[in-house]
Amino acid sequence: MTIAVVGLGQMGGGIAASLARTGTEVLGVDPQAPQTPDGVTRTELADAVERADVLVLSLPGGAQVDQVVAGVLEAPAPRLVIDTSTCSPDETRARAQRLGEQRHTFVDAPVSGGSSGAWAGELTVFLGCPDSELGRVRSVLQPLASRINHVGDVGAGHTAKLLNNLLCGIHLCAARALMGVSQETGVDPEALLRAINTASGRSAVTEVNLPRWVLSEAFDSGFPVGLMARDVDLATELAEKAGAASPLVVAAAQMWQDLGETLGRDEDFNRMVTG
């Protein structure tokens, strides 16, 4: 089996490297990436579509995914396309239908775990995939993931990932208040976090994000404000379509948009806590 990874940024590069460590032939496609991971052969998209049995996409958004889909439609034999990008579930289902009409298979497998998880092969996957394809897809994803959560058919993976990021985004907004109160009252933030992390208010944000990237002032998670703002917007749209919108979700979406405008969309997303 030959696998092509399309998109060799911080996430895609790690995914390609993790696949290559298994001894699988891995092609890499990205005209912008400055480096090619060890064990990966750099090539053009047309060549990758022709040679690869499986294409794993790690792209900024739907527009770039559509470019790959257009290329796959020209492939002579059925291809498996696994989209680890974060996109609209409705658009994902439409892509799957379009490719399915030409005997190709498209599934959504957005990931969480950051660039460090990608390079270590320890990502969490939210998988939207028909049961009939589950074994084949799992075999491709296993080298890059420590957890593969099959949440339903095509589109369900993106639904789960967007809701996960919505909750993370809301927790970071709330943590902004926590840190502000800590500073104003003189309560040591590390002591405050230790206490909260033994009680019901704890979350991944208090247990991981605040000590690792905020209190340390590292702010190098690899995930920018702009992408979190996009994900929260997509999740807000999803909630509104489902009739499940709430003032809290709308307020969080506005906070992320405001942060992008005031601080910059390329800043680390943990900057929400400090503003």
Image: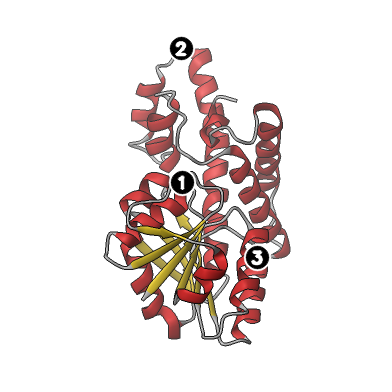
Residue annotated with mark 3 = 67
Name the amino acid type tagged 3. Answer: Gln
In this rendered view, identify the residue nearer to me: 158 or 243: 158
Residue at 71 percent of width and 63 percent of height: 243
In terms of secondary structure, where does tag 2 sit? loop
Marks 1/3: CA distance? 20 Å
Residue 162 against residue 134 in the figure, above or below: above
Locate the N terminus by quadrant: bottom left
| Circle on res. 10 | 1
Q: Indicate the position of residue 69 as horizontal and vertical percent values.
A: 62, 71
Residue 231 against residue 205 in the figure, above or below: below
In terms of secondary structure, where does tag 1 sit? helix
Name the amino acid type tagged 2. Answer: Gly
| Circle on res. 131 | none
Q: Residues within 10 Å of mark 2 (few under 14, many from 20)?
A: few
Residue at 48 percent of width and 52 percent of height: 8
In terms of secondary structure, where does tag 3 sit? helix
